[in-house]
Amino acid sequence: MIFDIIKKRRSVFPAQYNDKPIARELIEKVLEAGNWAPSHKKTEPWRFKVIQGETRAKLGMFLSLKYMENDPKPKQFKVEKLINNPQKAGAIIAICMQRDPNESVPEWEEVAATAMAVQNMWLTCTDLGIGSYWSSPGLIKHMGEFFAMEEGEICLGFFYMGYTDDELQDGERGAVEDKTTWL
Ligand SMILES: Cc1cc2nc3c(=O)[nH]c(=O)nc-3n(C[C@H](O)[C@H](O)[C@H](O)COP(=O)(O)O)c2cc1C
């Protein structure tokens, strides 16, 4: 049941991934799930850039260099994490949002629609037994220097994917009653 998958979905981080590769058909399935997200006026603003194989190392190098360039006091452990994390992933999908050139809907709706695409992808990964999470480092503002982006396209983060041998912990949430008003 969908509710069980919603509750089972967890953030699974690169440090938890094993070396098992992710089949291309499964990555395509995850992308297809993202593509079925709803969007106001059917703008379908989500854009995906799949980073695999050797491009992962290039991404790690790019992010670490950008970090060192922009942080007056870069920390060695962070440099290493930025270099190594992409290579631990089976695949990384850069999550981008293409603003409708006609601005037919407010920008937040296009960000929201893209986030719905990510949730579809995350739940699909959970169903497929693939660990994943949405990473949104400040460095994403430089991604236009790493891959081509269209006018009005912005990068909202990275969707990391990898198999894990870890047993995942149950999630925790505050009571929904505390966040709900019945009128
Ligand atoms: C928009 C968005 C951005 C996120 N960015 C990060 C991030 O940069 N680093 C991180 O460790 N987790 C990030 N997360 C994952 C959250 O930390 C995680 O979803 C939260 O702790 C709840 O854990 P769960 O996903 O296992 O339920 C992000 C989640 C969302 C929805």
Image (cartoon, helix red, strand yellow):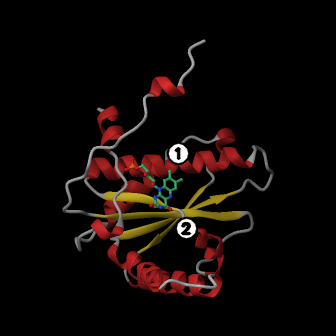
Residue closest to the eye, 163 or 172: 172
Residue at left 52%, top 45%? 116
Q: On the rendered image, what quadrant is the C terminus found in?
A: top right
* Percent of width and height locating residue 106: 75, 45
SS type, badge 1: helix
CA separation, marks 2 and 1? 19 Å
Residue type, mark 2 in image: Pro
Q: Quadrant of residue 150?
A: bottom right
* Percent of width and height locating residue 167: 20, 54
* Percent of width and height locating residue 111: 64, 50
Residue type, mark 1 in image: Met
In the rendered structure, the answer to whether residue 36 lies left or right of residue 67 reads left
Q: Is mark 2 within 8 Å of ligand 1?
A: yes
Task: Judge whether residue 61 can be spotted in this image.
Answer: yes
Q: Which residue is mark 2?
A: 137
Residue at left 64%, top 76%? 142
Q: Quadrant of residue 104?
A: top right
Establish if 152 lies above or below 123: below
SS type, badge 2: loop
Residue at left 68%, top 64%? 153
In the rendered structure, the answer to whether residue 40 lies left or right of residue 117 reads right
Q: Which residue is mark 1?
A: 116
Mark nearer the viewer, 2 or 1: 2
